[in-house]
Amino acid sequence: MNNHPSDTQDIHEKALVFRLVNNDEEAFSELYASYKDRLIYFAMRFVKSREFAEDIFQDVFSVIWQSRHFINPEYSFSSYVYTMVKNRVLNMLRGIESEKRVMQAILSQAIDYNDDTSRNVLYNELNEIIEKAINRLTPRQKEIFRMSREEHMSHREIAQKLNLSNYTVQEHITQALKSIRSFLAKYPGSMADLLLILICLKI
Amino acid sequence: MKEKKDKTGAIPRFLNGTYTVNEAYVFLEESNDPVNKDIIEEAAFSVWRESQFLEKTEESLKKEYREEAYALLKKIGKKKRKSLKPLLAAAGSIAAAIAVIFSLFRLYEDVSRQDIYYECIETTYGERKDITLPDGSMVILNSCSRLRYPTKFTQQTREVRLQGEAFFDVAKDPDRQFVVSAGQFCVKVLGTAFNIKSYDMDEITSVKVDRGKVQIEMPEATMRLSAQERVEVNSLRGTIKKHQDLYETAGWRKGCLYFDATPIQDVARELEREYNCSIVFQEGQEFDNLISGEHDNQSLESVLQSLEYISGIKYKKNNRHILLYK
């Protein structure tokens, strides 16, 4: 299931980096191909959009090629790559005021996103509605969703605890999000009514 | 179960993809707050660690990626080569002519260069000097640095050479570029203000732009910097980093020390230059700390104390001799 980076992989990578420094385009394409999924995954966790993640990834590898002579094959290539992608991701989030499209991508992935800006729900009340929606999930979905949202466990930590694959955890969360969103969407324009009901119930 | 310092939980929720609109805003706010820098770094690193356990890329997809990589190389190459192509095409036939012209040009240059004299200004430990160049540009030289410049700028460009650190406020002259050579940097501007830090002994050298735009040429990369951007070259690791830096440019002019993930060795050298002392590291111990922080006009003693506080590295001070140990 998991491909732990082993020593032989490290040696293999070091050889590729060495070739890269010596202008080897094939080595470049090999590193590009082996890092792409990982870097896209990392960037998407922050920018929430494949398109922006791709932009960042392409930029990182352009810089790698252009500054290849500065790369020291004796140092960890992966931490070099990590620093570059992380800085770009955080910069993109920092410049978010000017980059409306990034903000839009992030908001559109939120649990309670809707494009009707007139519906602003108060934070605590929204949590109650979400709570209600969570209670309608299947037991497994509920368990995993709570671990993620309330106990702040990463997908991997959840996977290890429940002895599932990362992929399965991801799938459960995706499904859970889908059904919560559709629960929230069932009350188009009447979020206020729903709130009223909830408030009444509390009394 | 886990000790997280952020109060709202917005950071893990955002990263796990289980966030609300409100939490997205909170996340962005928290992640931009320098107070949370460590938390964000830690969170990012744990996502990175997680990412190494992804399923292996399928071979068919990998093939696609490799093709993408070649396409990217082509794209990069085109941008660079464009200006060279006509030159290369003509090179074969007129090489001889060029050689003749070039040697004549060199001769002319040699002749016209004869009446150029160079001024060389140096600073020692803890010393700074204000210099006005022949074209009215202002330079402030930081400690242990040297600036060499012609007494008259007669060339097409205004060229100066720097060792160490200096802040430049360049007089506008759209017809004559101002060029600073400093270590591996060649910084070209028309009229701007910027700081170059390029001490031979330092691991990190940097250029920070205060006003306007500059072009920086390095052996293998050329880049443009705008105001409040900084480029950092780590000679030991072979990395180049360009990022926004909203701190005051050349805070050293006012006696501020400013470190941003600076290797402890560079910090030590900076303290040596600033306070005229000698700092050594305990033999047999490894020091790989990165130091961040600001110090305004403080005594060496108090800088060392705060260093101890943030990094756990202790110090013994005997007159001007300091030993750092763990």
Image (tube, helix red, strand yellow):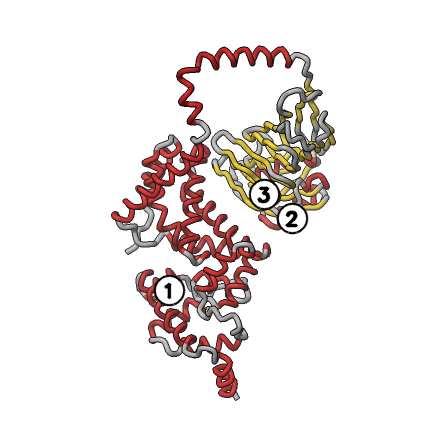
Same chain letter for marks 2 and 1: no
Q: CA distance from mark 1 to mark 3?
A: 40 Å
Q: Position of residue A46 (x, y in %)?
A: 46, 57
Could you say which quadrant of the image residue B297 lies in? top right
Q: Chain of mark 1?
A: A
Q: Secondary structure at mark 2?
A: helix
Q: Nearer the viewer, residue A22 or B294?
A: A22
- The amino acid at mark 3 is Glu
Same chain letter for marks 3 and 2: yes
Residue B306: assigned label: 2
Residue B38 shows up from this direction = no
Q: Is residue A23 left or right of residue B165?
A: left
Q: Nearer the viewer, mark 2 or mark 1?
A: 1
Q: Position of residue A86 (x, y in %)?
A: 47, 49
Within-10-Å neighbours for mark 1: few <14, some 14–19, many 20+: many
Q: CA distance from mark 3 to mark 2?
A: 27 Å
Q: Nearer the viewer, mark 3 or mark 2?
A: 3
Residue A11 shows up from this direction = yes
Q: Position of residue A130 (x, y in %)?
A: 45, 75
Within-10-Å neighbours for mark 2: few <14, some 14–19, many 20+: some
Residue, disc 1:
A158
Q: Chain of mark 3?
A: B
Residue, disc 3:
B229
Up/down of B132 relative to A84, above or below: above
Q: Secondary structure at mark 3?
A: strand
Q: Nearer the viewer, mark 1 or mark 3?
A: 3
Could you say which quadrant of the image residue B201 lies in? top right
- The amino acid at mark 1 is Ile
Q: At 53% from the left edge and 73% from the top edge, which residue is drawn?
A: A118
